């Protein structure tokens, strides 16, 4: 039996050794561990909605929403609460169990909080798990979101501490770790992962996973993103990562964090069915679905369902949440004149 005792003391050398295993041996070990903690044929399905797009002051070199680059992403105001709830209902109708909301902010301002809190409360009332990614959070903001009922907060580490300076200069690695601690201290679940394919070394991929696995408590969700190369960003012409190296990263994440959901996240649009199937075999058991993933393309929900059928996979049902699916697509039942639209203009 493979040892799956939770550890928080991994060394980079140990993790590099896992990466170096023969591919079949690595996937076999990851699959053994996966089956000890999860239904191997169930995948948690989430939808991600951008509630405020563009004009982010951060200079993350991978991000099309950064105000530092010209990528064609328009600056948009914070989405109306009513509209967000319509999107959440539609996501539930298509089988999502978790609804994630992302805003292109360095950190939410005090004026933002009443709106995002309304969103959290409204989505919770629909019977969906809630997740947000809004940038850095203070202790007080984390407490406010937890009291509103937010289940998960996403804040990625992106890469290893050593490679981090090649990615971003406007926020420190410690800033990211502090936000994760504020989220955990407030009593929320943590969603934290990173991006691979940014020109980092295998050692950097090992370093990223070490940071996540050695947190005092493993993140409940670990999104592993493949870089989506966007024209106008500094990484638009970077070399592609070997697909097998991406699968290895999924497998190592599964081994290091046996009880965490490992999410196959951004970059799936560029993955063929065979590569995605290998990721599921390696221990990925969570995805985002829908046509958009913030501002980049994502496989359509129908395509995902077809692949699930071919592989014998099924969406995971979340305990404590209704699995009833709405029978009809959401219609514009109430006009703006009948039900006030709640938003403000972003300055």
Image (cartoon, grey):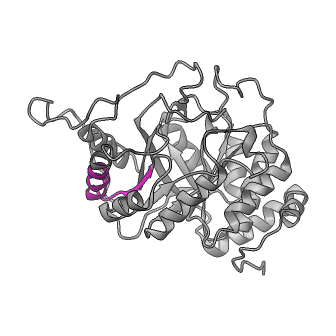
Q: Residue furthest left?
A: 338
Question: Which image quarter is the C terminus in?
Answer: top left
Q: Specify whether residue 171 is in view.
A: yes
Say if 177 sits above or below 99 in the image.
Answer: below
Please provide percent x and percent y for residue 170: 61, 39
Please provide percent x and percent y for residue 87: 33, 40
Q: Specify whether residue 42 is in view.
A: no
In this rendering, would 236 be left or right of 70?
right
Residue at image location 25% in from the left, 35% down from the top: 343
Residue at image location 46% in from the left, 45% down from the top: 107
Residue at image location 66% in from the left, 38% down from the top: 169
Decide which of 50, 19 is in the foreground and name it: 50
Please provide percent x and percent y for residue 197: 75, 39
In this rendering, would 142 be left or right of 22?
left
| 123 in the magenta segment | yes
| 315 in the magenta segment | no
In this rendering, would 213 be left or right of 347?
right
Q: Which residues are magenta?
A: 117-132
Decide which of 336, 108 is in the foreground and name it: 108
Question: Which image quarter is the N terminus in?
Answer: bottom right
């Amino acid at each position: 039996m493979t040892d799956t005792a939770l550890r928080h003391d991994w060394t980079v050398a140990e993790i590099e050794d896992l990466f170096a295993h023969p591919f079949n041996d690595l996937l076999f070990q990851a699959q053994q561990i996966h089956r000890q903690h999860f239904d191997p044929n169930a995948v948690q399905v989430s939808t991600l909605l951008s509630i405020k797009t563009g004009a982010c002051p951060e200079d993350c070199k991978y991000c099309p929403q950064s105000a530092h680059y010209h990528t064609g992403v328009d600056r948009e105001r914070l989405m109306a609460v009513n509209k967000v709830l319509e999107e959440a209902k539609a996501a539930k109708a298509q089988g999502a169990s978790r609804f994630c909301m992302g805003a292109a902010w360095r950190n939410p301002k005090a004026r933002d909080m009443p709106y995002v809190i309304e969103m959290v409360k409204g989505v919770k009332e629909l019977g969906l798990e809630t997740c947000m990614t809004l940038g850095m959070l203070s202790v007080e903001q984390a407490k406010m979101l937890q009291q509103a009922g937010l289940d998960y907060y996403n804040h990625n580490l992106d890469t290893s501490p050593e490679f981090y300076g090649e990615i971003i200069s406007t926020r420190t690695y410690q800033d990211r770790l502090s936000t994760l601690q504020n989220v955990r201290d407030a009593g929320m679940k943590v969603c934290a992962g990173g991006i691979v394919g940014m020109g980092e070394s295998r050692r950097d991929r090992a370093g990223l996973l070490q940071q996540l696995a050695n947190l005092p408590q493993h993140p409940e969700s670990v999104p592993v993103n493949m870089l989506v190369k966007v024209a106008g960003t500094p990484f638009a012409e970077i070399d592609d990562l070997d697909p097998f190296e991406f699968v290895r990263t999924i497998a190592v994440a599964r081994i290091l964090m046996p009880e965490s959901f490992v999410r196959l996240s951004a970059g799936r649009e560029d993955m063929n069915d065979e590569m995605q199937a290998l990721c599921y075999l390696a221990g990925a058991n969570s995805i985002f679905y829908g046509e958009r993933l913030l501002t980049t393309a994502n496989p359509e929900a129908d395509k995902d369902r077809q692949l699930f059928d071919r592989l014998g996979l099924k969406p995971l049902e979340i305990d404590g949440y209704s699995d009833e699916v709405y029978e009809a697509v959401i219609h514009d039942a109430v006009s703006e004149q009948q039900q006030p639209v709640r938003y403000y203009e972003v300055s």
